[in-house]
Amino acid sequence: GIQVEQSPPDLILQEGANSTLRCNFSDSVNNLQWFHQNPWGQLINLFYIPSGTKQNGRLSATTVATERYSLLYISSSQTTDSGVYFCAVGLNYGGATNKLIFGTGTLLAVQP
Amino acid sequence: DAGITQSPRHKVTETGTPVTLRCHQTENHRYMYWYRQDPGHGLRLIHYSYGVKDTDKGEVSDGYSVSRSKTEDFLLTLESATSSQTSVYFCAISESIGTGEKLFFGSGTQLSVL
């Protein structure tokens, strides 16, 4: 099956710093999503980005499908950005996002 | 929150007892999923449903069964709970965005099997 590797596993930032999180995957995919799990356990979908670049406020993501990686950029980090960031990949079968494979996440701590 | 409600939010049970977790959605989504989250493993798919009475296995389905008798409800059952099933369980729905489906999660159920 598809393997998903995220790096770095842990990251500590000072408030206001920028960071880049990486997701590598082992096979062709047509579905890639980024999630943020906050310290209370809630999972929020940040981006659906099987290819190209998207931006949402201080966050942006780029996926280069041909090279099998995706990057999540966090600019001017805030303490509320703390938590775990997950990348998930898969193949759309007739529209069903079944069998998305998740990476093990990057744990981000933003210090004031 | 995509209208997803999981119940209960927390449960403690004993080894060998049956347990049912419920996921309820209010927005008529066709696809529903059950994931479990464990340290070091990220999230892993247990079962999913693509319609009423239509379900299929995920990557960690052993020891679990599911049922979907109504569009809005997706039940996960542990027939005889084991300590290895202590985990946080998340229900999800997927929403079509044209070229694919975007996943949204419920708040999770913390299950402890003693």
Image: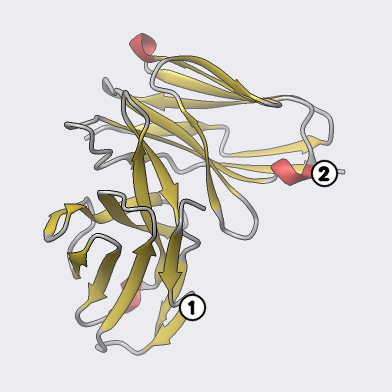
Residue B108 locus on image (x, y percent): 46, 64
Q: In this view, does B85 lie to the left or right of B111?
A: left
Q: Is residue B30 left or right of residue B94?
A: left
Q: Residues within 10 Å of mark 2 (few under 14, many from 20)?
A: some
Measure the C-alpha gap from mark 2 to mark 1.
30 Å
Name the amino acid type tagged 1: His
- Above or below B114: residue A44: above
Q: Out of B37 and A3, give the one closest to the viewer.
A: B37
On the rendered image, what quadrant is the C terminus of chain A found in? top right
Q: Which residue is drawn at 84% across and 30% down?
A: A16
Name the amino acid type tagged 2: Gln
Residue B1 locus on image (x, y percent): 52, 53
Q: Residues within 10 Å of mark 1 (few under 14, many from 20)?
A: few
The residue identified by callout 1 is B10
Which residue is situated farthest in the top direction here? A66
Point out the frontmost of discs 2 and 1: 1
Question: What chain is tagged by disc 2?
Answer: A
Which residue is situated farthest in the front direction here? B27
Which residue is situated farthest in the right direction here? A112
Q: Is residue A97 left or right of residue B109?
A: left
| Residue B46 placement: quadrant | bottom left
Q: Residue at x 39, y 42 (%)?
A: B103
The residue identified by callout 2 is A111
Question: What chain is tagged by disc 1?
Answer: B
- Above or below B9: residue B60: above
Q: How many labels does the image show?
A: 2
Q: Which residue is drawn at 47% across and 57% down?
A: B39
Q: Out of A57 and B51, give the one closest to the viewer.
A: B51
Co-location on one chain, circles 2 and 1? no
